[in-house]
Image (spheres, rainbow, N blue to C red):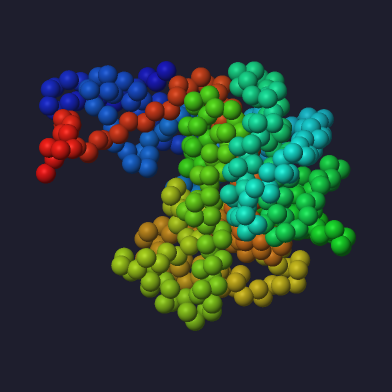
Amino acid sequence: MAEETVTIVDNRTGNRADLPILQGTEGPSVVDISRFYKEFGLFTLDPGFQSTASCESAITFVDGDEGILLYRGYPVEQLAEKSTFLEVCYLLLEGELPTRSQYDRFCRTVMQETMIDEQMRNFYKGYRHDAHPMAIMVGMMGAFSAFFHDSLDIQNPKHRELSLFRLIGKLPTIAAASYKYSVGQPFIFPKSKLGYIENFLRMLLKVPSAKFKISPRLVRAMEQIFILHADHEQGASASTVRLAGSSMANPFAAISAGISSLWGPTHGGADEAVLQMLREIGSVDRIGAYIQRAKDPNDPFRLMGFGHRVYKKYDPRARMMKKIAQDVLSELGREDDPLFQLALKLEEIAHDDDYFCRKGLCPNIELYSGIAQSAIGIPSNMFTVVFAMARSVGWICQWMEMIGSKESIGRPRQLYVGASCRDYVPLHRRP
């Protein structure tokens, strides 16, 4: 328990209360306001949770002022440079890096869960041929709970473990199938002997009439993209998963809710929006005009790929993503890619602009992510799906941590500004 307290005084009544100050291992201290309503008969108002910690968590730490992102204490840059995605999955789930035997066993278990029930393939036929893959992902994830009755007891640790392996293993399969269906191509079955990322790329990009071969350098780049997206503290989608899960909903329902939350253009949909913006700008000599538009409060235009709700300095993932994009384009002999050059110039101009410096509008991960994925061959409507696949491990960790902590059902309060209590007037008496 905390030794320090902060004293709150109600100027209306003179009531006082000492609320405990809690200190985590990193980041600012927090005031425990769980007794606030009991002591003062008041709620706190914090739209968008700008200053509110919704839970205790030991998974991920973000320091936006210093541009730091840690997974279980490890800097994300180190993990992206040296680790694999499944090793990061193990780290996030277990809290420590695996031994060789633990890692090999974990990988085997995940890859054994890549197949989906044949009946699930029929579900795809219920969607329009041009349905967005994210729409399909939401439905398919929700459907998992109709198939896996043997793992729905969330109080059973074995059921929770089985669910997490099924989620991690099957998401690439339903994701790739979602895209294949949307373009009228046959589904490609998973190949469990391949690595996790290469297996996904094969299911997504292979066509039956041709052999599939992809550069290991591109596979590694995609692996790094997954690592950078694996978790990010209490973002909108992670908070959604925890809130949905707090009702004791099964993990498949909670993850489906997270996918829905991620779909928004200001969350997971920003990669695609950046590419659309770069194509709209078109050339370097038009950048100045678009920066002026971004500064104009009366212009709805937003400069995508800059600024972040948390980061006030350079997003550490953006620095890595920029390098990944450079590596991918170099591997493909496309160093002069016009969109990449445009993004570089846009970053350079914004970096020297007083408005962007004053507002702390540094590049975020989305500025270069879409460029890198597009060069690898990922269709733009799959960018958010890739994000969802990578972030799913973070969601699972957040869900499992929430279940293990015995948190009560999430139930935010509100500042009501509607009509006061009034009596019903029969229809014939109303003017």
Task: Please name the residue shown 60% across and 72% down the image.
Answer: 339
Whether residue 264 is situated above or below residue 13 in the rendered picture: below
Residue 360 picture quarter = bottom left
Q: Where is residue 236 in the image (x, y as percent from the top left)?
A: 48, 42
Image quadrant where residue 181 sits = bottom right
Query: Does the rendering let one see residue 294?
Result: yes
Q: Which residue is drawn at 64% across and 24% down?
A: 152
Residue 136 to residue 337: above or below: above
Q: Quadrant of residue 102?
A: top right
Front residue of 369 and 270: 270
Left/right placement of residue 341 relative to residue 188 reads left
Question: Can you give x and y, in whole percent of width and height, for residue 177 in the image?
Answer: 72, 50
**Is 402 rendered above or below residue 172?**
above
Name which residue lies at 56% across and 30% down. Answer: 399
**Residue 17: percent from left, percent from top:** 24, 20
Residue 74 or 251: which is nearer the viewer?
251
Specify whether 6 is left or right of 128.
left
